[in-house]
Amino acid sequence: MIATDMSSASEGTGILFNLDGEVIGMISSDIWKDRGVRTANAYAISDLKLVIQLLANGASVPYIGVSGTAVTSGIQKEEGMPSGIYVIDVAADSPAMAAGIQSGDVICSVNGEKIVSMSAYRKLMLTLKVGDQIKVEGKRRGSEGYVDIKFDVTIESKE
């Protein structure tokens, strides 16, 4: 993510250029929703290259409908959370929702591959194909602490 101090409209989108005229990001209104601050934030173009390649080749972009943030080592120590991706939101009618993934879950691995950052999660998701069945393992906070959770999720396309 690229954070700026440029103001933007609530649904503002666009392209972010550096001083050499190179595209470095795509501004999106869905980054950090409901923050109460209207600054333009962008997805780094380096993180979008795989998506652009898929779309340019007529392929679908794999999607399960989870947005989240990495659980840092500081949060792990302070909050006693497991390592992984903390699920902030699950899109309505998404494959993740159908599988039972909920906000507050921590995704620890996908198909046996440990997940420790959103970047690693996104890159792994982009290697999958629409229709693939994946195994998502994680932790959910219960009354006695975190318990193991497992889901079978079928990859869909967001388009």
Image (cartoon, grey):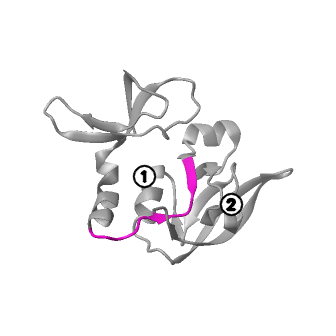
Q: Reading the chain from its start, which is encountered first: label 2 or label 1?
A: 2
**Is residue 63 inside the magenta stretch?**
yes
Q: Which of the 4 image quarters holds residue 72?
A: top right
Give the left or right position of residue 130, taking residue 144 as reference: left
Residue nearest the observer in this picture, 94 or 86? 94
x, y (%) of residue 113?
50, 67
Q: Left or right: where does residue 143 sit relative to residue 40?
A: right
Residue closest to the eye, 119 or 40: 40
Q: CA distance from mark 2 to mark 1?
A: 20 Å
Query: Residue 105, labelled with which disc?
Result: none
Taking 90 as reference, is 21 above or below it? above
Q: Which residue is mark 1?
A: 119
Callout 2 environment at 10 Å: few (<14), some (14 to 19), or many (20+)?
A: many
The N terminus: image quadrant: top left
Please state if 53 lies on the left or on the right of 133 as rendered: left
**Element under label 2?**
loop
Q: Does residue 122 sit above or below 62 in this rendering?
A: above
- For label 1, the SS is helix
* Image point (69%, 39%), residue name: 79
Residue at image point 65% right, 51% down: 82
Quadrant where the image shows the C terminus: bottom left
> Residue most toward the right?
143
Q: Which residues are magenta?
A: 57-68
